[in-house]
Image (cartoon, helix red, strand yellow):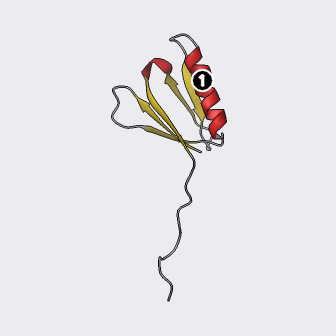
Amino acid sequence: MEVKIGVQSVHRELVVETDLNAEQVEEELRRALSMDRGGVFALTDVKGRRVVVPVSALGFVEIGEDESRPVGFGGTL
């Protein structure tokens, strides 16, 4: 699952590849947003790295399925 996180006052978005499904990511986001201003939205990527963003700095969170990319050449001979 690919998750894109926009952080306020930062021009680039964070892209996290996680093993969680869309419902689990949304639940983590809801949990973080329900906390006081000291809350954080945290995800662990597929390599075990943890991404932590303060809720007060969140701009957006885009939850999307991975698209399989075609491999090889487009035409047949």
| Residue at the spot of label 1 | 30
Q: How packed is label 1: few (under 14 Cα within 10 Å), some, or many (20 or more)? A: few
- Residue 72, compared with residue 53, is above or below; it is below
Residue at x-position 53% and y-position 69%: 71
Locate residue 5, reporting x and y percent: 47, 34
Residue at x-position 53% and y-position 62%: 69
Q: Is residue 44 left or right of residue 55?
A: right
Pick the front one: 71 or 75? 75
Q: Is residue 13 left or right of residue 37?
A: left
Pick the front one: 56 or 44? 56
Residue at x-position 52% and y-position 12%: 38
Locate residue 13, reporting x and y percent: 41, 37
Pick the front one: 50 or 14? 14
- Residue 68, compared with residue 32, is above or below; it is below
Tell me the kind of residue under disc 1. Arg
Residue at x-position 58% and y-position 15%: 34
Q: Is residue 9 left or right of residue 76?
A: left
Tell me where residue 20 sits by quadrant.
Answer: top right
Q: Which quadrant: the N terminus?
A: top right
